[in-house]
Image (tube, rainbow, N blue to C red):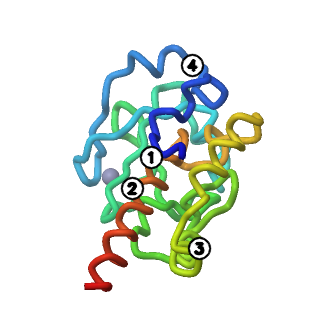
Amino acid sequence: MQQDHHSCCSNGVCEISDPQLKTSTTGLCPQSGSKGKRVDGATVKAMLAVTLTEVRDTPYFFCKDADCPVVYFSEDGTQPFTTDQIRERVYQKEPDSDDVFICYCFRHTPRSIRSDLIVTGESTVVEGINAGIQAGQCACDIRNPQGSCCLGNVSAFIKEIRQTLHHNDE
Ligand SMILES: [Zn+2]
């Protein structure tokens, strides 16, 4: 059983190619002040539902704060992009939604993962995603608003649901 999410991208298949991203600094969201995670410019361009004339050649960061409408912001904090300007609903911004994608490449939602767990007592989602990564089918950098692999989020979600189910059993 492959449960360790560190195995994701270790084969380099879905690793972000921009070497700058690995040495990048962190930015602080101009709205919430939370620490942003550096994202590839290609992710921002792929995700925007507005004209790309607003995109500048500067480092962008992803704000994962659920209470903050800002999804992407630039290093200097000007002209942030908010949830209503993004083509996808953003999992991190809707942690309690059942029908937002948690895995954008293979289209798993909290509801689909939860019902799988309740019905079968098991989840094959992580194995399925790993198999997809091995097969070169994932495109996290342009499909997932966070610009990186979803496996960490999926594993954390499954763990959380398991705990809830376990508590209900007692
Ligand atoms: Zn923010």
Q: Kindly state the secondary structure of the residue where label 3 is placed.
A: helix
Q: Specify the label residue 152 is tagged with.
A: 1
Measured Cα–Cα span from mark 1 to mark 4: 21 Å
Q: Which of 134 and 105 is in front in this view?
A: 134
Q: Where is residue 40 in the image (x, y as percent from the top left)?
A: 55, 31
Measured Cα–Cα span from mark 1 to mark 2: 6 Å
From the image, state whether disc 1 or disc 4 is nearer to you.
Answer: 1
Is 136 placed above or below 150 here? above
Is 134 placed above or below 162 here? above
Q: Three-letter amino acid code at disc 3?
A: Asp
**Is there CB contact under 8 Å for labels 1 and 2?**
yes
**Which class describes the residues within 10 Å of circle 3: few (<14), some (14-19), or many (20+)?**
some
Q: Three-letter amino acid code at disc 4?
A: Asp
Q: Nearer the viewer, residue 96 or 42?
A: 96
From the image, state whether disc 1 or disc 3 is nearer to you.
Answer: 3
Measured Cα–Cα span from mark 2 to mark 3: 16 Å
Q: Kindly state the secondary structure of the residue where label 1 is placed.
A: helix
